[in-house]
């Protein structure tokens, strides 16, 4: 057991070092000449600022992680593109080879227009496009991996601390985390789920801190923050699916019977046309769907507002540099205000997601209370 | 060109005005809802000041839920404008 633990620790340290090394070395390699001269003249040609493009570039996903553009030279971390095409099998290459849709590598290129916009497609011999199975490490995937690393670091060290000083007062990071963990246990899990709350605590804690950390990381402008993870509907979809699956698996007979035979509803709403069951079953799917959309829309809207204020600066600056400077003072103060609000919203959205998940778990596992029991 | 063709050509862009109107209506709804929640929470705190902690957390939960509904409309309007 001891050998396994130290092996695990070594593997963990190796992975962290490897990732840090990979991240640190890559910006150097991504400045490859590829059309650098061409880029400069192109910049002067279409210098007009497009706010829509600017905003979507920042809230969307991308194959490379763009850090900044210095003097027309782009500095970004080229993340690996991992594809499985039906003709070539597994293909792995660096996203720098895609060159933002200008270059073609091995019959693969980043499509910039049409229905496949923003995705890597394979150009077949007859010119038609086909999308390969794409499991690349994109910006959002990389950000999720980073937040996983952060969560593991924080919580594993705190768990070790708990084991090493049993029964004593907490200190340091353990102290800070205990506030939140006890809050989730006493104010979210116990009141919503009742005495069976311990089974659901791991999931509730995970989802709370995952959403909260990713929301906060999305507000930091430099790498490794700044990737709009929780504003990606695929991520929130997965979280909502987890809640749905756990609710459904833990639903007891009483819970499922209530769908077909809602208590206190007159019989003519269930038979011959099962109106109540239809309403109940659509509710079953709508509740996780709403969880997904609430988190996605809150985060994306916050980012869009903050980016919109920045767009104002460039928009007015293009008309007249003096107005640009004037507007920038106003815009930056608004963005600071919005960011403070976003910090609050980050915590509130994590809290609401966790609370609603706990409520659904509670509803799925309540014991049957008949009217006679209340006397 | 006839009036119809002129209107049709302008139609695609004018349709985006629908998105703006929709977003505005959604914000009105959210404003009324969350304002109501806040106001009643104030009244409740005035009636029983020692329950301020409970009232505050319940108010925030209700506000987040109402805001979620308003965001549905915002997302739909964004879909109209950009897709």
Image: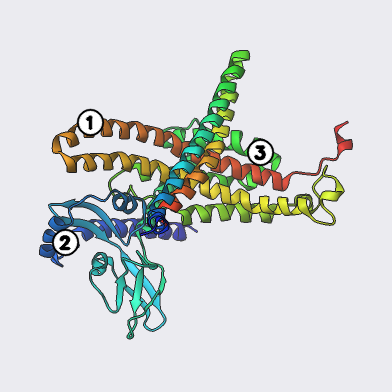
Same subunit: marks 1 and 3: yes
Q: Which mark identifies residue A329?
A: 1
Decide: is A305 above or below A116: above
Side of A202 where A134 appears, left or right: left
Relative to residue B55, is residue A324 drawn left or right? left
Q: Nearer the viewer, mark 3 or mark 2?
A: 2
Q: Nearer the viewer, mark 1 or mark 2?
A: 1
Residue A154 picture location, percent across and down: 42, 44
Q: Which residue is mark 3?
A: A192
Quadrant of the image occupied by residue A88: bottom left
Give how far across and how far down residue A30 sits, in percent.
20, 62
**If you read the primary sequence from the N terminus, does the residue marked by circle 1 or circle 2 appear first?**
2
| Pointer 2 local density, CA inside 10 Å: few below 14, some 14–19, many at least 20 | some
Q: Secondary structure at mark 1?
A: helix
Q: Secondary structure at mark 3?
A: helix
Which residue sits at x=48%, y=36%? B27
């Amino acid at each position: 057991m001891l050998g396994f633990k130290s092996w695990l620790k070594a593997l963990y340290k190796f992975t962290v070092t490897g990732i840090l090394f990979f991240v640190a070395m890559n910006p150097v390699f991504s400045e490859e000449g590829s059309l650098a001269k061409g880029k400069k003249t192109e910049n002067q040609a279409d210098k007009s600022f497009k706010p829509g493009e600017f905003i979507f570039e920042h809230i969307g996903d991308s194959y490379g992680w763009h850090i900044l553009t210095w003097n027309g030279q782009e500095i970004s971390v080229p993340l690996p593109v991992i594809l499985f095409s039906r003709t070539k099998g597994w293909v792995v290459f660096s996203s720098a080879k895609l060159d933002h849709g200008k270059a073609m590598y091995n019959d693969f290129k980043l499509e910039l227009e049409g229905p496949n916009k923003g995705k890597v497609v394979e150009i077949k011999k007859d010119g038609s496009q086909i999308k390969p199975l794409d499991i690349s490490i994109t910006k959002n995937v990389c950000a999720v991996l980073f937040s996983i690393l952060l969560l593991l670091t924080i919580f594993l060290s705190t768990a070790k601390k708990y084991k090493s000083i049993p029964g004593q007062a907490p200190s340091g990071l353990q102290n800070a985390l205990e506030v939140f963990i006890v809050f989730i246990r006493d104010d979210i899990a116990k009141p919503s789920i009742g005495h069976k709350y311990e089974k659901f605590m791991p999931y509730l804690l995970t989802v709370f801190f995952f959403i909260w950390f990713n929301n906060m990381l999305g507000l930091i402008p430099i790498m490794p923050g700044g990737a709009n993870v929780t504003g990606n509907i695929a991520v929130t979809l997965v979280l909502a699916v987890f809640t749905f699956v756990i609710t459904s698996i833990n639903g007891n007979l009483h819970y499922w019977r209530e769908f077909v035979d809602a208590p206190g509803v007159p019989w003519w709403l269930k038979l011959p046309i099962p109106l109540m069951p239809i309403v109940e079953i659509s509710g079953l799917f709508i509740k996780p769907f709403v969880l997904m959309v609430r988190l996605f829309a809150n985060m994306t809207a916050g980012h869009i507002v903050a980016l919109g204020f920045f767009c104002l600066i460039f928009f007015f600056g293009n008309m007249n540099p003096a107005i640009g400077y004037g507007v920038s003072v106003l815009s930056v103060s608004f963005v600071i205000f919005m960011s403070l609000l976003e910090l609050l919203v980050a915590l509130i959205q994590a809290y609401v997601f966790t609370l609603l998940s706990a409520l659904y778990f509670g509803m799925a596992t309540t014991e049957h209370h008949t009217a006679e029991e209340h006397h | 060109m006839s009036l119809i063709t002129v209107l049709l050509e302008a139609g695609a862009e004018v349709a985006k005005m629908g998105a703006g109107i929709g977003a505005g209506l959604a914000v009105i709804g959210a404003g009324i809802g969350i304002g109501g929640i806040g106001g009643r929470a104030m009244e409740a705190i005035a009636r029983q000041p020692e329950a301020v902690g409970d009232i505050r957390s319940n108010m925030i939960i209700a506000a987040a839920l109402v805001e979620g509904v308003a965001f549905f409309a915002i997302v739909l309007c964004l879909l109209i404008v950009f897709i």
